[in-house]
Image (spheres, grey):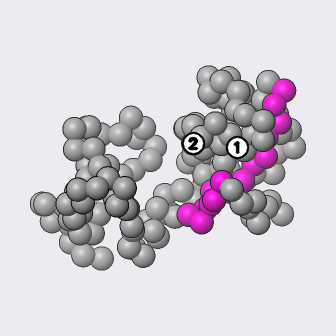
Amino acid sequence: MAAKSALARTFMQALRPDLGRPASSLISDVLLEDQPIQPPEDINDIMVSFSTSEMQSIEAEFKYTLLLKFPKGCPKLTRVRENISNWGLAHAFSVVPMNPRHVILHLTSVDDFGQIWTRGSRSIDSPSFRLLKWSSKFCRKEESSLAAV
């Protein structure tokens, strides 16, 4: 691994230099290997790409991350958080909206991950949901082939 230089910036700093540290200390920032290129004049040409080592870092950071998929739409995020708080988790977690039908549940412990991944009940305030294992190959338009065994 290359030494971190004084000029190294994180992904968040490259996208939003006006922001300080992220709101959640549960999810660490990914260090970019190279300085990002200047964005093109046409905003439609902007693209983000990650190196293999950056993807490995992201995969490691999110190894205990699940997605809650609500086929008919997600309930209020406060209700999702309250409900998950009652699941008896032993360690810190964060709940972040992804889109109107998916919620990201980032766990910090393998024990909590196992407890939730194999959990029987699959509803919050009546709307049922499916648990999906987060993967860098996740595509919201395709069904995941990952399942608890």
Give 127 or 42, whichever is nearer the viewer: 42
- Residue 20, quarter of picture: top left
At x 30%, y 40%, the residue is 21
Q: Is residue 6 above or below residue 67?
A: below
Q: Are marks 2 and 1 in contact (CB under 8 Å)?
A: no
At x 78%, y 41%, the residue is 71
- Whole-angstrom CA distance, mark 2 to mark 1, is 10 Å
Q: Is residue 23 left or right of residue 80?
A: left
Question: Helix, strand or loop at disc 2?
Answer: strand
At x 55%, y 38%, the residue is 96
Res 11 seen here: no
Indicate the amino acid at tag 2. Answer: Met
Which quarter of the rendering shows the C terminus? bottom right
* Classed neighbour count for the residue bearing mark 1: other residues with Cα under 10 Å, few (<14), some (14–19), many (≥20): many
Give 18 or 21, whichever is nearer the viewer: 18
Q: Is residue 27 left or right of residue 77?
A: left
Residue 98: which disc? Answer: 2
Question: Helix, strand or loop at disc 1?
Answer: strand
Tell me the chief SS of the magenta region. Answer: loop
Q: Is residue 41 above or below residue 33?
A: above
Q: Position of residue 24 (x, y in %)?
A: 42, 38
Q: Position of residue 74 (x, y in %)?
A: 70, 32
Residue holding disc 1: 68
* Classed neighbour count for the residue bearing mark 2: other residues with Cα under 10 Å, few (<14), some (14–19), many (≥20): some
Which quarter of the rendering shows the N terminus? bottom left
**Residues in magenta?**
126-140
